[in-house]
Amino acid sequence: MRASPTFLAPRLKGRRREDPPSRFPHAPSDSRDFASNLSPAQFVCLMPMESATMAESSNLLDDSPEASAWVDHIEATHPERHIFGKIRCGVIWTSSPGIDGEPLVPVDPSVLAGWINADGLPLFNGHDSGSPVGQVIAAKIFTSTHGVRFVAAVFGFYSEERRVGFSDLGLDSMQAVQPPQSLPQLAADVWMAFETDPREVDAEWQEDALINAPLPVKRKELSHNAAEPLTELIRIGLPYVVLVWNPFITTVATEAGKDAYASTREWLRKLWKKLAARRSPIVQISSYQDGCEVSFLFRGNDVAVNYAAHDALSTAAMQAAQLIGQMRKRQIAPRTMTYEFDSQSRKWYPSYTVLQNGQLVSDRNLLIALEQLPSQLSLGIGRHD
């Protein structure tokens, strides 16, 4: 019989120096302690912006010989440059205000550059985390000869030629799993994250969605800075053990603990019905397992399809944990892993994973040719309540 992954209840304490930063508030399901360490900018998207064109970005770079020299140096020497098909540069922040007099991107540029240089930022097509484009791999603050401060960045774009499949690494991404015999009690101080952009998802719907939330909720306002949002992104962070639980796992530390698992999953199930009122929703449920951020994407407002995805979520979470375990045994370090639901087969499958070195791993061609992508950037950020 195949051994099942171990799932431990999360605890919220100080993050160790060597641990990767967490976008969501819950510890991975191992013995290490993680704390919330939300980034000022969580992703960069390729889509039309409210202001600032790539021509303006190019002018700023041309106006700063120091910035141009830095870009050339990064493009020639960055250790991850060989992972990507193409390397490009641009400007992701400036001190110039928008037409309303407010900053185009309300974030401290030194914090933004520091975050990118420490951990990088993913590039998505639109604000769809199921459509990876590449990564922002380096950033630095400069001042133009006209006194404009700006953050120059170097982008690595994925290519089909350099995509690696799970099977290429000797991994079985759809291996059968054995459910755990028991699950631990949820910690008393555990909570869930709920994140949306109020320009995409109205406050009234948010309040209704959070009625009878089974865990304390920490909300964060996202700011996608997109002129014409294509989707309504709702991000929910939960403990990984909650995703693994299903009614057939009967052994929980206490009866109250079992009720906590059941009520959380029931709240999620009710959410799928409420999505019917949305136009083009994407619900991204994320958590951590063994140091890897795992996301499950519920797409659209079809209640029947989302119910089916909900019912299959426990098996998918166990498969993801097993896949991460396989990778760890082969000394492969996954940073993120994203699952999509196939409405025809009624199964979840791993769409892609990004390794710690930036390498994209996927068994399917999900990449869009660089020439077909929008030429402008939208920087998605988050603001705490």
Image (cartoon, rainbow, N blue to C red):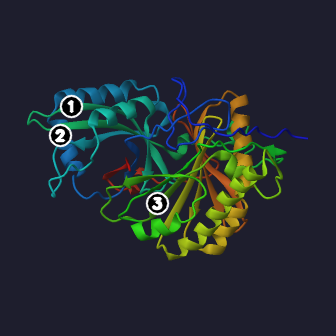
Task: Calculate the distance from the C-alpha at mark 1 to the C-alpha at mark 3.
Answer: 33 Å
Could you tell whether 79 is left or right of 261 in the image? left
Amino acid type of the residue that numbered disc 1 sits on in the rendered structure: Phe
Around disc 3, counting alpha carbons within 10 Å, would you say few (fewer than 14), some (14 to 19), or many (20 or more)?
Answer: many
> Residue 233: which numbered mark, if any?
3
Task: Please tell me whether mark 3 sits on a helix, a strand or a loop.
Answer: strand
Instruction: List x then y, in percent, for residue 92.
Output: 29, 43
Q: Is residue 220 above or below residue 39?
A: below
Could you tell whether 371 is left or right of 241 in the image? left
Task: Calculate the distance from the C-alpha at mark 3 to the C-alpha at mark 2.
Answer: 32 Å
Amino acid type of the residue that numbered disc 3 sits on in the rendered structure: Leu
Relative depth, front residue between 375 and 183 = 183
N-terminal label among 3 and 2 = 2
Which tag is nearer the camera, tag 3 or tag 2? 3
Relative depth, front residue between 66 and 21 = 21
Residues marked 1 and 2 touching at CB (< 8 Å) = yes
Residue 111 shows in the view: yes
Q: Which residue is mark 2?
A: 60
Residue lying at the far bottom in this picture: please name it. 277
Residue lying at the far left in this picture: please name it. 146
Around disc 1, counting alpha carbons within 10 Å, would you say few (fewer than 14), some (14 to 19), or many (20 or more)?
Answer: many
Instruction: List x then y, in percent, for residue 194.
Output: 49, 55
Which tag is nearer the camera, tag 1 or tag 2? 1
Relative depth, front residue between 26 and 79 = 26
Task: Calculate the distance from the C-alpha at mark 1 to the C-alpha at mark 2.
Answer: 9 Å
Q: Quadrant of residue 60?
A: top left
N-terminal label among 1 and 3 = 1
Amino acid type of the residue that numbered disc 2 sits on in the rendered structure: Leu
